[in-house]
Image: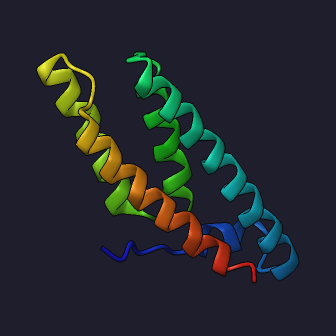
């Protein structure tokens, strides 16, 4: 799945300054990678904090208008709430893969 992104919001924030945009993308990448590491840890520990991580990740994804992954995160939250269970390994693996692909795509924006 090719995840769509839109850097319009980031461009507005930095007033279309390409250098600042590259810095902002770099910070987005570092922050998102950090959140994924925390989610990995919380998933392995079956820790409820994974839901906070998902909400935080939704914010990161919203910054680049990645609505399909925002919706996927929300669906994971909703499913977990309705079933009263943490997300399953398959769901987390799929989301993790898509986020990793997205991070690589963002890295291409600063090359």
Name the residue nearer the viewer: 76 or 95: 95
The residue shown at (47%, 19%) is: 49
Name the residue nearer the viewer: 14 or 100: 100
Instruction: Say which quarter of the image contains residue 11.
Output: bottom right
Q: Examine the rendered structure and indicate whether residue 25 appears above or below residue 37.
A: below
Give coordinates of residue 101: x percent, y percent.
Answer: 47, 67
The residue shown at (38%, 72%) is: 3
The residue shown at (47%, 26%) is: 52
Left or right relative to 50: residue 68: left
The residue shown at (74%, 78%) is: 110
Q: Residue furthest left?
A: 83
Name the residue nearer the viewer: 109 or 38: 38
Give coordinates of residue 55: x percent, y percent.
Answer: 45, 35
Q: Examine the rendered structure and indicate whether residue 17 appears above or below residue 25.
A: below
Give coordinates of residue 16: x percent, y percent.
Answer: 77, 80
**Quadrant of the image for the N terminus?**
bottom left
Instruction: Say which quarter of the image contains residue 91.
Output: top left
């Amino acid at each position: 799945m090719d995840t769509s992104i839109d850097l319009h919001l980031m461009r507005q924030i930095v007033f279309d300054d390409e250098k600042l945009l590259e810095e902002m993308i770099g910070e987005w990448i570092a922050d998102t990678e950090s959140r994924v590491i925390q989610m990995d840890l919380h998933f392995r520990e079956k820790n409820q904090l994974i839901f906070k991580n998902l909400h935080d990740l939704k914010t990161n994804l919203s910054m680049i208008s990645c609505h399909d992954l925002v919706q996927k995160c929300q669906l994971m939250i909703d499913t977990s709430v309705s079933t009263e269970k943490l997300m399953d390994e398959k769901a987390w693996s799929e989301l993790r893969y898509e986020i990793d692909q997205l991070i690589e795509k963002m890295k291409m924006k600063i090359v």
